[in-house]
Image (cartoon, coloured by chain):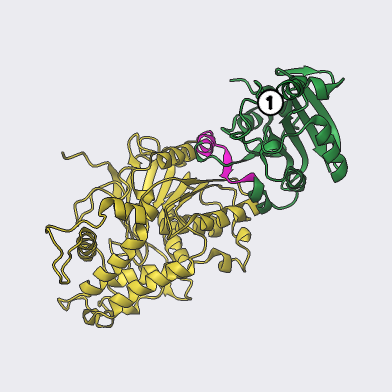
Amino acid sequence: MATASIISNHGTVTLPEPLPLDGEQRLDGVEIAYEAYGTLNPARDNAIFVAHATTGDQHVASPHPITGKPGWWDRMVGPGKPIDTTRFYVLSANVLGGCMGSTGPGSLAADGKPYAMRFPVITIRDMVRAHVALLKELGIERLHAIVGGSMGGMQALSLAANWPDMADRVLAIASTATMAAQNIAFQEVGRQAIMADPDWQEGNYYGTGKAPDAGLSLARMAAHITYLSEESLTGKFGRRLQDRDAKSFGFDADFQVESYLRHQGLSFTGRFDANSYLYITRAMSYFDLEEEQGGRLAEAFARTHAKFCVISFDTDWLYPTPQSRKLVHALNAAGAPVSFVELAAPFGHDSFLLDVPALDRVVKGFLEQ
Amino acid sequence: MSLRPDLALIASHVQPGTRVLDVGCGDGMLLAALRDERAVDARGMEIDAEKVEQCVSRGLSVIQGDANTDLAFYPDDSFDYAILSQTLQTTQRPDQMLDELLRVGRQAFVSFPNFAHWRVRLYLLAKGRMPVTRNLPQTWYDTPNIHHLTIADFRDLLDVRGVKVKRCWFLSRGKLISPMNANWRAHNAVFQVTR
């Protein structure tokens, strides 16, 4: 059944000023693609910014233009949903470095050719700086809340630390203030898979008719495992075989889980740019609010008056609860009003995207008070 | 909804506009009352995720955590008051809990069921079994109350720790009673203590 689009506003804004970057460069003519739902009230104080995760985009609650699938947080954002678009003006933007309309390595540089690896290495804070510039262009001075899961949570925390007056509420789900070694390690595997693909061509595959699909697909397969839990993989696939009665004694996708992963990898290549994947995961691996604040995480939150809510999931081994707790302790030390809850959900890191009724209640409760 | 009698007592003695941590805050009834009626900066800690969820829905700042270990993450003097209601007897080390309450808070309110109430004493004397009463309804093997105490025991602990009593109240079936023979007559005690 087709449903009416709930998009109230969308477009691409070209930032009027060059964007300063943590890597001590500036980017001219940065474009940021955004999408919004609901109505900005006359006081302009009901805006909620939803920051997307690594491979997400601005299509939070509208069908993806390439895959046609529902928006990645369709279950959370919409009329009467936990982030209620009849009440809030909900805005999301493709991150800097992305490939869904915002400036990234696939965009054209001043010489008319794609940046490819000439694109500067960016940070989470650079992404947030671009979002802040976008909000300014859209006439939004202050956010009712910034909400994000995983890398979206990092953006939310970065906003609170670096633009302390910008958001009244900060909600970080399944996230961390410091990218841990294990996460850096997994992302390095993904990047190496892409860069080892001969079709990557040192990043200059645009317009060659070839792209590092094998490498990007492998990166996605490896990453996808980290988003799930043993429990969810076992429950969903067990050792069941794929369309066959016996093992093939070959290297086909005998098992359903193998077939599933191959499908996840392949379908990802149709909607995501390999170089964007390199740049965005690099930004994540550089993310360390503690280091940014001279080794005292609490300092990051000393200047903000925002209320915080931190949520983790018991089966998330990629961003496990102790990382959220560390963040909460720093918020406590800074005297920030903070709520924290570890929710029980079977889906691993992906729990923040899936059907977890308790998550809905906490999100709604936090945003509406 | 009205507050449980010991909580109402505590609420009425918290100075308006102060900072309060309710350790084991449950569904946040006391915190909500303190925030709404006394403009208190009210924070909580609660181990049960569902109760934390209810607190967050009330707009309260509550952290899911284990009071036995997680108070350590609050800096000294974070709060004007730390509150521990009907929970001391469930902690692993009540003595250390008292120290922690008075480290993170300048003052503390502690309420607990009195194991020396005459019904409890009589139960043990007559039946020779661990008392099961209306006030203490669980059997010895499934009770969370692993460190039962009496009013006299608590006073002894305060003496050993050099903690001063600012005020104390005694309750029987939810009603205030005189301090006379409280250790026989009170079901519950509430102490306001300070370093």
Q: Which residue is at 38% across, 70% downward?
A: A187
Specify whether residue B52 is painted magenta: yes
Residue B164 or residue A171, whichever sits in front = B164
Q: Is residue A124 left or right of residue B44?
A: left
Q: In this view, does B8 lie to the left or right of A165?
A: right
Q: Start and end of the magenta stretch?
A: B51-67
Q: Which residue is at 84% across, 43% downward?
A: B195
Q: Which residue is at 86% across, 44% downward?
A: B160
Q: Which residue is at 43% across, 67% downward?
A: A183
Q: Which chain is green?
A: B
Residue B128 or residue B142, whichever sits in front = B128
Q: Is mark 1 on a helix, strand or loop?
A: loop
Quadrant of the frame with the N terminus of chain A: top left
- Which color is chain A depicted in? yellow
Q: Is residue A349 left or right of residue A253?
A: right
| Residue A346 rendering spot, x and y as whole percentages | 37, 48
Check disc 1 and report the residue beneath it: B131
Residue A92 or residue A323, whichever sits in front = A323
The amino acid type found where label 1 is placed reads Pro
